[in-house]
Image (cartoon, rainbow, N blue to C red):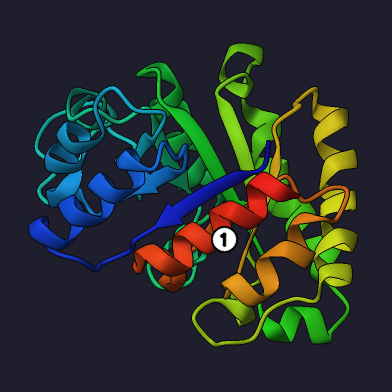
Amino acid sequence: MRIVAANWKMNLRRQSALELASRLKADGRQCWLFPSFPLLPAVAQAIAGSGLLLGAQDVSPEEDGAFTGDVSAGQLADAGCSLVLVGHSERRHGHGERHPLLLRKLKRAAAEGLKIVYCVGETLAERQAGRAETVTGEQLGTLQKLDESERAMIAAVAYEPVWAIGTGENATPQQAQEIHAGLRAALQRLGISAPLLYGGSVKPDNARELLTQPDVAGVLVGGASLDYESLAAIDNAAMEA
């Protein structure tokens, strides 16, 4: 079964989030939902008793304390989350998050029992310089610093080329497969058997071809996950792949 993870980013309001989550539940879907922090409790209640899983878009590296604006892993678990994104490109490139901070976030999330979707991906300049595999491999190398129990908390690794996020551009299925194959080999060396997701302008019209690639086990969907019909179409493609 292919995974469909829906990253709602900084979108929706309580009512629209509830309506979308409720429709997904009524259809018996099993997507992974990543709403923004204020929506988590309401969405958790809306999807209770379903096959849908709730995740957060980020997590503090700190356990608790005087860290204004941060949200701890313990608070996320308390709000109903079982998953969390770490290393999303919009955090890496928009907020300057690098290896030492991401490692602390990984360890903190694992310590609180949250499963992790760890994100990697190269910029356009890095791809044009022929460094896509090198960059993603270096980013994946952060996982080497996790112990065995922490590595077991990696629910998935998402490859999201930065140049394809929110741009309307996307990696071809062949480009996605090429990077995924390299990531699969690197994960095997680390003893991690997590599925690989592709993220980057995933839409109903390209989801099926992406999902039929041998090392693409699912998709991380951004803008197309905000509309029920488009998300349902992508999920249908995942179920048929």
Question: Can the viewer see residue 218?
Answer: no
Secondary structure category for the residue under label 1: helix
The quadrant the N terminus occupies is top right
Which residue is at the front of the view, 127 or 167? 167
- Identify the residue at horizontal 71%, vertical 31% (top origin): 144
Residue identified by numbered label 1: 234
Which residue is at the front of the view, 20 or 90? 20
Quarter of the image for residue 206 reads bottom right
- Give the total of numbered labels: 1
Question: Can the viewer see residue 150?
Answer: yes
Relative vertical location of residue 129 with respect to residue 199 in this rendering, above or below: below
Q: What's the residue type where badge 1 is placed?
A: Ile
Q: Position of residue 186 (x, y in %)?
A: 85, 40
Q: From the viewer's perspective, is 26 left or right of 238? A: left
Q: Position of residue 200 (x, y in %)?
A: 60, 71
Q: From the viewer's perspective, is 220 left or right of 52? A: right
Relative vertical location of residue 127 with respect to residue 211 in this rendering, above or below: below
Q: Where is residue 151 in the image (x, y as percent from the top left)?
A: 63, 23
- Identify the residue at horizontal 33%, vertical 63% (top origin): 9
Which residue is at the front of the view, 85 or 219? 219
Q: Where is residue 43 in the image (x, y as percent from the top left)?
A: 20, 42
Relative vertical location of residue 65 with respect to residue 168 in this rendering, above or below: above
Furthest residue in direction top, as rendered: 149
Q: How crowded is mark 1: few (under 14 residues within 10 Å), some or many (20 or more)?
A: many
Which residue is at the front of the view, 198 or 18? 18
- Identify the residue at horizontal 23%, vertical 34% (top origin): 72
